[in-house]
Each structure stands twice: as structure tokens, then as C-alpha cells.
């Protein structure tokens, strides 16, 4: 697994640290923020007869633990789609991480895939937040929403990606952070997820993610 690489940005008057691990760190709040882990997706596919290796889930959990080891956060805030399809064998990997990091609080703004009851999430060690939960003037949601003037939004759900020209005739797709004046869209944390290259608003900046780092692209 590659080392964590960082890109500092200013958003809503705060310094945020984007990483090549598809998560961001907010130093002032000592909080890791990420979205769309889709824990249990590979097991759900295997149950449907689609052969996928266990390493699909293991790699994501290893990356999450690496981020926690690196930043030693007080909180991990997930903006939706923590789970993919309810409880299955891979959720135990997540539960192990939560139990092993008992000084860190795990928070969830539920997404459309998070169909477990709040009580079930609490049994896993996760505190449920209302959609639109705010720290200062930053609201956290699963999908993007409009807020009053002066407010900002960090969200997930869209799995943003961007096409980048490679040479004269070819392009490559990269997962990315999408940053505009009032909105920041997080990449899907799970490596086993598709990319939507149509969700990037005109005038935004994208921070494309690759294994060894990040680079800015004007959209």
C-alpha cells in the first residue's frame, strides 16, 4: 500500500487536507471525512454468484486503518453509504476496526444504501447524525443540497470521476474530489466502485486521485 499523499485546500475558511486514499482530513476538528465505503458489496455480489475475492473488502479496511494510524483522529465522519446491502460477513471487518480504535468516534450521515435501523448501527459502535448535520458553516449530507447564503456543503453519493487527456488521442479516468466555492463532493472511498464523470459542475476544480498522489484539474 502506497504512503498517504496530501493536498491542502481552503474551503469555507477552513484548511482541509485531501488525500490520495480518497478521504480528507480536517485538522482543526481532528476529523477524517469520507464517503461511500459500501462495506459488504463484494460479499453481496458473491452471494449472487459473482466471484469476487475477499481482498476487495480487506484492502478498503486496511486503507481506513492506515488513515486512522496516520492522523490519530478524534472522529471519523462518513457521509453516507457506509454499508452496501445490510449485514454480511464483511461488516465484521468494519466492526473490528471500530472496536480496535475505541478512542475514536465513528459518525454516519445515512445514505440510500444504509438501510439498517439506527439501533443496529449503534450496536456496531456508530453514531447516527441527521442529514445536514453541521460543524460551523459546513453541512454534511449524502447527496448535494442547497443551503442558505454563507453555508457550505460536503457530500458523497455521486462517486465523481474525471477524464484526463493522456497524449493527443487518449484519456484516462480518475476518481476525484470536486471543489467549488460552496460545495465539496467526496470520491467514493471503496476501490470497488464506479465513476460518474458527468457530475462535475462547470467552474469547479477537480483533484484527481492516483496511487502516488493527487493533481488539480480545472473543470
Image: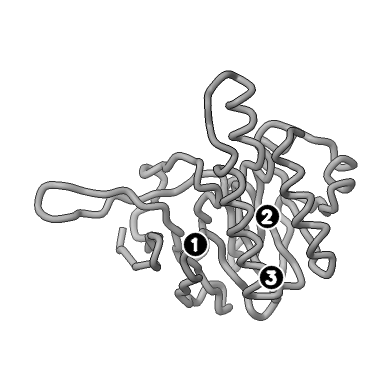
Q: Is residue 59 left or right of residue 28?
A: left
Q: Residues within 10 Å of mark 3 (few under 14, many from 20)?
A: many
Q: CA distance from mark 2 to mark 1?
A: 22 Å
Per the image, the residue denoted by label 3 is: 31
Q: Is residue 31 left or right of residue 119?
A: left
Residue 3 position within the rendered picture, expressed as x and y whole percent measured from the top left: 49, 70
Q: Residues within 10 Å of mark 1 (few under 14, many from 20)?
A: few
> Relative to the observer, which residue lies in front, 154 or 191?
191
Per the image, the residue denoted by label 2 is: 78
Residue 163 position within the rendered picture, expressed as x and y whole percent measured from the top left: 29, 49
Q: CA distance from mark 3 to mark 2?
A: 10 Å
Residue 115 picture quarter: top right
The structure residue drawn at horizontal position 46% and vertical position 72%, both measured from the top left corner, is 5
Earlier in the chain: of badge 1 and badge 3, it is 1
Residue 77 position within the rendered picture, expressed as x and y whole percent measured from the top left: 70, 60
Q: How is the image coloured?
A: one colour
Earlier in the chain: of badge 2 and badge 1, it is 1
Mark 2, mark 1: which one is toward the viewer? 1
* Residue 208, numbered circle: none
Per the image, the residue denoted by label 1 is: 1
Q: Do the residues bearing badges 3 and 2 touch, measured as CB atoms within 8 Å?
A: no
Amino acid at each position: 500500500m502506497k504512503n498517504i499523499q496530501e493536498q491542502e485546500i481552503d474551503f469555507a475558511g477552513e484548511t482541509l487536507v485531501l488525500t490520495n486514499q480518497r478521504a480528507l482530513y480536517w485538522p482543526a476538528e481532528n476529523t477524517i471525512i469520507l464517503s461511500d465505503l459500501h462495506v459488504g458489496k463484494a460479499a453481496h455480489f458473491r452471494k449472487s454468484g459473482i466471484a469476487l475475492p475477499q481482498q476487495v473488502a480487506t484492502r478498503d479496511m486496511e486503507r481506513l486503518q492506515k488513515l486512522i494510524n496516520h492522523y490519530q483522529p478524534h472522529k471519523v465522519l462518513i457521509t453516507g453509504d457506509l454499508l452496501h446491502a445490510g449485514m454480511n460477513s464483511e461488516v465484521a471487518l468494519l466492526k473490528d476496526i471500530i472496536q480496535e480504535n475505541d478512542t475514536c468516534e465513528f459518525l454516519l450521515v445515512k445514505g440510500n444504501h444504509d438501510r439498517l435501523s439506527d439501533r443496529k448501527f449503534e450496536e456496531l459502535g456508530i453514531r447516527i447524525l441527521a442529514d445536514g448535520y453541521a460543524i460551523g458553516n459546513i453541512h454534511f449530507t449524502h447527496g448535494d443540497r442547497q443551503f442558505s447564503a454563507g453555508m457550505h456543503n460536503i457530500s458523497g453519493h455521486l462517486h465523481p470521476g474525471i477524464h484526463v487527456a493522456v497524449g493527443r488521442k487518449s484519456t484516462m479516468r480518475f476518481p476525484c474530489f470536486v471543489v467549488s466555492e460552496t460545495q465539496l463532493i467526496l470520491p467514493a472511498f471503496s476501490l470497488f466502485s464506479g465513476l460518474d464523470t458527468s457530475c462535475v459542475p462547470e467552474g469547479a476544480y477537480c483533484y484527481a486521485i492516483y496511487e502516488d498522489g493527487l493533481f488539480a484539474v480545472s473543470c
